[in-house]
Image (cartoon, helix red, strand yellow):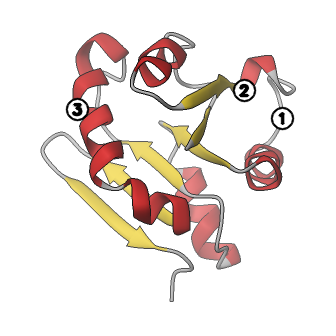
Amino acid sequence: MKILLDMNLSPDWVKVLESAGWEAVHWSTVGDMRAPDEVIMAWARENGHIVFTHDLDFGVLLALTRAESPSVIQVRTQDVFPEVLGERLVRVLREHEIVLEKGALVTVDEGKERVRVLPFR
């Protein structure tokens, strides 16, 4: 599984995700830091990455376009640093890896996770 980290997340996530066995890259190393979400989504789709973000707009884009990919993992917690959320996110990714590889939106809140399979109907 390959994961693209959005600009609103720390590049420190790359180490956490790679140490768990996944390929990870921060958007700042592959694209324009001011790129709109649509460009980030297109890059992820074309390059086989899942988008990891703290931005709710990615879920909206999936809904509006009825896209089948890329998968998106969005965190809706106050503290999104790997030191706080790292272990939980790795567990969630392992738990939902198969559905993420097929196409899904996984939302991680303070107390639970929700999974929606793509495309939204």
Q: Indicate which disc residue 35 carries.
A: 1
Q: Is residue 34 left or right of residue 2?
A: right
First along the sequence among labels 2 and 3:
2
In this view, 73 is above or below 5: below
First along the sequence among labels 1 and 3:
1
In this view, 54 is above or below 80: below
Residue 39: horizontal and vertical position, in percent?
83, 47
Residue located 36% across and 16% down the image: 81
- Marks 1 and 2: CB-CB under 8 Å? yes
Q: Residues within 10 Å of mark 3 (few under 14, many from 20)?
A: few
Cα separation, mark 2 vs mark 3, equals 22 Å
Cα separation, mark 1 vs mark 2, equals 9 Å
- Marks 2 and 3: CB-CB under 8 Å? no
Q: Amino acid at mark 2?
A: Trp
Q: Is residue 58 left or right of residue 15?
A: right
Q: Amino acid at mark 1?
A: Ala
Q: Determine which residue is flagged by label 2.
A: 27
Q: Determine which residue is flagged by label 3.
A: 88
Residue 10: horizontal and vertical position, in percent?
52, 15
First along the sequence among labels 1 and 2:
2
Residue located 59% across and 30% down the image: 23
Cα separation, mark 1 vs mark 3, equals 29 Å
Q: Indicate which disc residue 58 carries.
A: none
